[in-house]
């Protein structure tokens, strides 16, 4: 706790009672304002919580990326199947057109 002294000229102007009241107000204000300040322990706790949150988020992100990778692999297989189906259908249409116009 800080010791506050009131200079003699101010104490003479205010009087002993007013000077003591002024010191009391300053001390109470200092105590309440210090309660709002973060301590090293508060900052350490916040740091630990932040590290845990970042770790959890990175784990979730890895899981999400893995799931997306699996879905994309499945979609690539389906796209290859669709390409083959379109190719076979196109070949069938071309063969019907050729039969209609060139085979009499």
Image (spheres, rainbow, N blue to C red):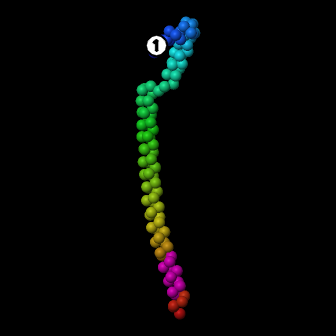
Instruction: Give yes or no for residue 92 being in the magenta stretch.
Output: yes
Q: Which residues are magenta?
A: 89-99
Q: Give the residue furthest to the bottom.
A: 104
Q: Give the residue furthest to the top.
A: 16
Magenta-highlighted stretch: main secondary structure? helix
Q: Is residue 60 left or right of residue 24?
A: left
Question: In the image, is residue 8 above or below residue 76?
Answer: above
Determine the secondary structure under disc 1.
loop
For residue 20, say whether it is visible. no
Residue at the spot 46% in from the left edge and 68% down from the top edge: 81
**Residue 74 sits in quarter:** bottom left
Q: Position of residue 75 (x, y in %)?
A: 47, 61
Q: Position of residue 94 (x, y in %)?
A: 50, 82
For residue 22, say whether it is visible. yes
Residue ID for mark 1:
3
Instruction: Give yes or no for residue 21 being in the magenta stretch.
Output: no
Q: Observer-nearest residue: 43 or 51?
A: 43
Question: In the image, is residue 99 above or below residue 32?
Answer: below
Could you tell me which quadrant the N terminus lies in? top left
Q: Position of residue 38 (x, y in %)?
A: 47, 27
Question: In the image, is residue 16 above or below residue 70?
Answer: above
Q: Position of residue 49 (x, y in %)?
A: 44, 34
């Amino acid at each position: 706790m800080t010791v506050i002294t009131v200079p003699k000229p101010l104490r003479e102007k205010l009087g002993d009672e007013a000077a003591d009241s002024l010191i009391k107000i300053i001390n109470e204000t200092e105590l309440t304002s210090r309660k709002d300040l973060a301590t090293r322990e508060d900052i350490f706790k916040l740091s630990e919580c932040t590290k845990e949150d970042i770790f959890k988020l990175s784990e979730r992100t890895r899981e999400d990326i893995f799931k997306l990778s699996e879905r994309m692999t499945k979609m690539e297989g389906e796209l290859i199947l669709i390409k083959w189906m379109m190719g076979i259908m196109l070949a069938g249409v071309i063969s019907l057109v050729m039969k209609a116009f060139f085979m009499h």
